[in-house]
Image (cartoon, rainbow, N blue to C red):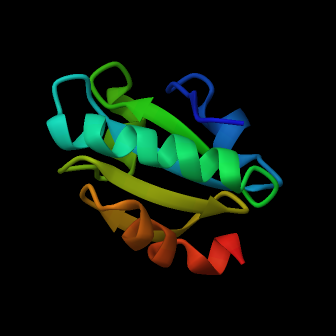
Amino acid sequence: MSTRDVTDATFEAEVLNSEKTIMVDFWAEWCGPCRAVSPILDAIATENADKIDIVKLNVDDNPQTAMKYQITSIPAMKVFKGGEVVKTVIGAKPKPALEADLAEFLA
């Protein structure tokens, strides 16, 4: 399964109330590094569908959630487990670096 979109309206149900570990990619249409990291996240999501879900939240369209999690630079990725942020990754990185950042959730 590749990534899917969440919104301010669906964030609580799809992320905070999820049984699974979820990584939220905070991004925007105009952000070049966000577009660069998107296919990498799709690949990680597909390869690790049994361990982690990856969702995308457009910060321009969903300012409430972006503000709540103090997103000041993008791409920003936050890993949620049991409704709590357990890891934050800032900036676009190559796939091996992102997999290393997420190793504890992909094991």
Q: In the image, is 72 to the left or to the right of 36?
A: left
Q: Quadrant of residue 91?
A: bottom left
Could you tell me which residue is drawn at 26 percent across and 55 percent down? 92
95 versus 14 height, above or below: below
Could you tell me which residue is drawn at 47 percent across and 78 percent down? 100
Q: In the image, is 30 to the left or to the right of 40?
A: left
Q: Which is nearer the eye, 28 or 83?
A: 28
Could you tell me which residue is drawn at 31 percent across and 31 percent down? 59
Could you tell me which residue is drawn at 50 percent across and 27 percent down? 8
3 versus 23 height, above or below: above
| Residue 62 visible to an observer of this rendering | yes
31 versus 67 height, above or below: above
Place of residue 2 in the rendered image (x, y in percent of width and height, measured from the top left): 63, 35
Place of residue 75 in the rendered image (x, y in percent of width and height, measured from the top left): 28, 48
Place of residue 7 in the rendered image (x, y in percent of width and height, measured from the top left): 51, 24
| Residue 53 visible to an observer of this rendering | no
Q: In the image, is 46 to the left or to the right of 56?
A: right
Q: Quadrant of residue 77?
A: bottom left
Q: Which is nearer the eye, 63 or 90?
A: 90
Q: Quadrant of the C terminus?
A: bottom right
Q: Quadrant of the N terminus?
A: top right
Total count of labels? 0
Place of residue 35 in the rendered image (x, y in percent of width and height, measured from the top left): 28, 34
